[in-house]
Amino acid sequence: MTPFPAGDILPRAARANAVMICPNCGFDNPEGTSYCGKCGTKHGAAAPVSVTKTMETPTQRLPRGVVFAGRYQIIEELGRGGMGVVYKAVDNKLKRTLALKFLPFEWTYDAQAKERFVREAQAAAALDHPNICTVHEIDEAEGRMFISMAFVKGETLKTKIERGPLKIDEALGFGMQVAEGLREAHKKGVIHRDIKSANIMVTEQGQAKIMDFGLARVRGGTLVTKEGMTMGTIAYMSPEQARGEEVDQRTDIWSFGVVLYEMFSGQLPFKGEHDQAVVYSILNEQPKPVTDLRSNIPMALEQVVGKALEKNRDERYHHMEELLADLKAIAEGIEPEGIRARLRKAKLLKRKKAILYAILASLLIIVTVVALNLFTGRAEAMDSIAVLPLENLSGDPDQEYFVEGMHEELITELSKIRALKVISRPSVMRYKKSDKSLTEIAKELNVKGIVAGSALKEGGIVRISVQLIEAETERNLWAERYDKDYRDILMLHGEVALDIAQEIRIAVTPAEQTRLASARPVDAEAHELYLKGRYYWNKFSPEWAEKSITYYNQAIEKNRTYALAYAALAESYVMLSTGFDILPGKDTLPKAREAALKALEFDPTLADAHVSLGLVAACYDWDRQAANKHFKKALELNPNSISAHLHIEIYLSLLEGKYKEGIDHLERAQELDPLNLFVKTRLGFVYYYSRDFDRAIDQFKEIVAFDPNNPLGHLGLMEVFGKKGRYDQAIAEGEKLLESGMRAVAVIGELGVWYGFAGKKDKALELLSELKARSSQGYVSSFWVAAIYMGLGEVNKAFEWFEKAYVERDGNLIFITAPTPFDACSPDPRYKQLLKKMGFEHLFEKVYSYKR
C-alpha cells in the first residue's frame, strides 16, 4: 500500500469563456454568435473541431448479418457522422438494397435529438429529385430511430478530389447537377446548411446526389440542436453561419462555392492549422484565385466562384437559379451575363499583375536556392528529446518561479505530440546547474536531442531563447529567439513547440497542431499568480500544496475563465486527500471535480483535468467506467503525460486487477521519466500485487540503494517482507523510517499492521494510540486505523473503521482490493459486502484466492 502518486501533472493552454463580448479582441458580437465577427475567436468551450469533418458521435454497432426490425438484414457499416451511423442493408420484404441511418443510441431518449432526426427525414422526404438521395421512410424499432433511404453505390466527391483536381468539364458537370438539386431543395424551402464534398455522392454512372440533410432546416421551422455542437463543417461554413446569425439559402450558395473551388483547384479556399484560424480566414481573408492555382481555368469560372464566396451575402448570388444559369453558360462557351462587370475588372487587374509576377518568379528562384542551402546538413528526424531547465537571464531569484513555469509549459506543449518522446520535468530538473556534458545527459535520459535555452520577463514582454542540440555530437542544429507580449505567453509555448517539431522532422497530426495552436491570450496578473502556484506545487509537500491552492484561487479571482488555474486547483485538491492524506476525500474531491469540470468548460484539451476527474471517479465515486474514460482521454490529449500513465495503472491494478496492463503503462512512464523513483516504486507495488514477491523485493532494494532515504522504497520492502512472513525484516524497514523522522500516517499504519501480525501487540497498540491522538488534532485516515486493528486480529473493530473510511470517502480505501495484508479478512462476509458497496465485487474472487 502506498499513497497515490502525484507525478508531474502538467497544465494546458487556457481558452476564454463563452461570452458575446469577444474575449480575444473585445468586439461586441450579437447574442448567440459562435465566432467573433472580427477576429474569428470561437465563443464557448467546444473541443477543437476538425476543419474537414462534422462532429462524430459514438454509437452501438450492428454486426454484419443481423436482421433489424424483423426486416432489414445488415450488410456493412457505410459511415458515421454528426447525427448517426449509416448501414448498407437488404430489405427482405421488398427485396431491395438500401441504406439505414440510425440516431445514435445514447440520443434515443433525447427529445431534441429525436426531433432533429425527424426533421432531417421530413426535409429530405419532401424532395423528389434525381440529384438528391431518396428517403423511403422514417420509423422506430427495437428502441432505435432510423431512416430508410436509397443506397447510392459510388464514392463521395471528396474522395474523387483527394486524387487531384477534377477535369474542368467533369467538375462543371458535377457542379451543375448539385446546383440542380439545391435549386429544387430551395424551391421547397429546405436549406441544407452542411453542403460539402463529403456530403455529395457520385454514382458509377457519374450522377451526383446530395446526401445527409442532418442539419437541414425548413424555412419557418425551428432549428433543433444539441447544446455545444458545432453545426456544419467549419471549412465550408458561410460567414453568417460562423457568426451564429440567421441563415437563408445563400449559406448553401457559399458552401457550394467552396465545393466548386475545391473541385477546380484540389484544395480548400479557407485553411488554417486550427478551427479559429479557419474561421478568421472565412471572416477576414480573400481566398487565392483559382486561376492562380490552375492556369487553364476560364476567368469566367473564377468569377462565378468568387461571386458565390462573397463575404457580404447581399453581394453573393441570391438564388441557386442564377448560379446554375452562369455555370450552364460557361459550359456552353458563353460569357455569363451576371458576371460581365466582374470579368472586366478582373482582366484589368490581371494585366497589372503580370509584371509583378515576373519579378516574383525571379525572387522565387533565389529563395529556393537559399532554402536548399539552408536545409543541407540539417538533422535527421529525432523521436526523443529532453528540455533542460531554462536559464534565468535576469539573475533575479524572484523571477525563478516564472522561468520554471516557462520550462514546465514548454515540456507540456511538446508532450502533446504522440510521435515524440519528451522526458518529463522531474527527471530533467536533476540536471539544473549540472556539470555533466550534454552527451552524458542524453545517454542517461536515452534521448537523441537536447533543447536548452533561457527565459526573461521584462516589463510586459516575455523572451525565450531556445537551441536544438544533437546529443551524440553536441552540434547546434537550430536556434531561435522569441519575443512576445505577456498576454500571448501561452501562444508562445505552442509556437516554440511546433517550431521544434518542424526542426526535428517529427510528424505532428492535425489534431495535435490544433491543440498546440489553440491557446488564447491570458490575463497577465492571473498568469503570474498561477505560475507562483505551480512553483510552490512543484516543491511537493502538503504545506506547499495548500499554498498553491491560495495562489490558484487568487488567479481565478482575477480571471474567472482561466482554465489552467482551475485544472491546477483540481490537482491540488485531489492530492490533499489521495496523495498527502491530510484531508478526507469527502472534503476535497467534490471540490476537485468542480474545478476540473470548470477547466474543461473553458478548455476541453486539458489532459490534467481529465486525470483529476479520473481520480475522483476512482477514489470518491468508485466508478470504474468513468475512471477509465477520463484516464484514457487524458492519454489521448497528452500521450506523454506521466501523471496519466501513473494513474491509469492505479485504476488497472486496483480496480480491475489487470496487473500486466498496469505494468505496461508504468514502463512507458519510466521511458518518459527515467530518473523518477516514484515510477520505480509503483512498479515494485504492482509486482507485489501480482504476487511476484521476489521481483518486488529486487525493485525496492534497487530504489533504496539509489536513495537510502527514499521512504517509499522502505515502505515497499516493509510490505513485501511482511506478506512473506518475514516480520522482523518488515519491522526493521518500518523502524528505519521512524528513526529518520518519517512519521507519516501511512508509515505508522503499515508498521502497526506488521507489529500486530508479529505478535508485538504492545507496539501495535502504541502506534494505534498515536493515530487516534493525532485524529483529535486533525484528519487521520480511518483506513490505517482499521489496518492496525486487522493486524491485531480484532476484525470487528477493523470493519467498524473500514465503514468509517467508507463514509469519509477515504482515498486509501481502494487498497482493500489489492491482494495485500487485507486479504486476511477476505473470508469475512463483511469484506464482500464492502466490495459490493464500492462497486468492486468483481474483484472478490481474485483477492479471496490470495488469502493468507
Image: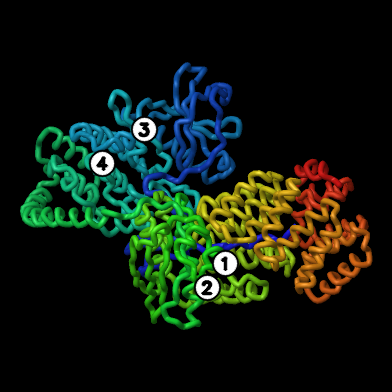
Q: How many marks?
A: 4
Q: Earlier in the sequence, mark 1 or mark 3?
A: 3
Q: How far, Cα to Cα, is label 2 from label 4?
A: 46 Å
Q: Earlier in the sequence, mark 2 or mark 3?
A: 3
Q: Is 348 on the left or on the right of 212, as rendered?
A: left
Could one spot residue 554 in this view of the protein?
yes
Q: Earlier in the sequence, mark 1 or mark 4?
A: 4
According to the picture, the residue beneath numbered tag 1 turns out to be: 568
Q: Earlier in the sequence, mark 2 or mark 4?
A: 4
The spot of residue 425 in percent (x, y) is: 53, 64
Could one spot residue 137 in this view of the protein?
no
Q: CB atoms at circles 1 and 2 under 8 Å apart?
A: yes
Q: How far, Cα to Cα, is label 1 from label 2?
A: 8 Å
Question: Which amino acid type is marked by label 1?
Answer: Ala
Relative depth, front residue between 296 and 309? 296
According to the picture, the residue beneath numbered tag 2 turns out to be: 530
Q: CB atoms at circles 1 and 3 under 8 Å apart?
A: no
Q: How far, Cα to Cα, is label 1 from label 4?
A: 44 Å
Question: Which amino acid type is marked by label 3?
Answer: Leu
Q: How far, Cα to Cα, is label 1 from label 3?
A: 53 Å
SS of the residue at dot 2?
helix
Q: Is 548 on the left or on the right of 708, as rendered?
A: left
Instruction: Please give the label number shown on residue 127.
Output: 3
Q: Is 52 on the left or on the right of 406, as rendered?
A: left
Q: Is 614 on the left or on the right of 421, as rendered?
A: right
SS of the residue at dot 3?
loop
Disc number lying in front (2 or 4): 2
Question: Which amino acid type is marked by label 4?
Answer: Gly
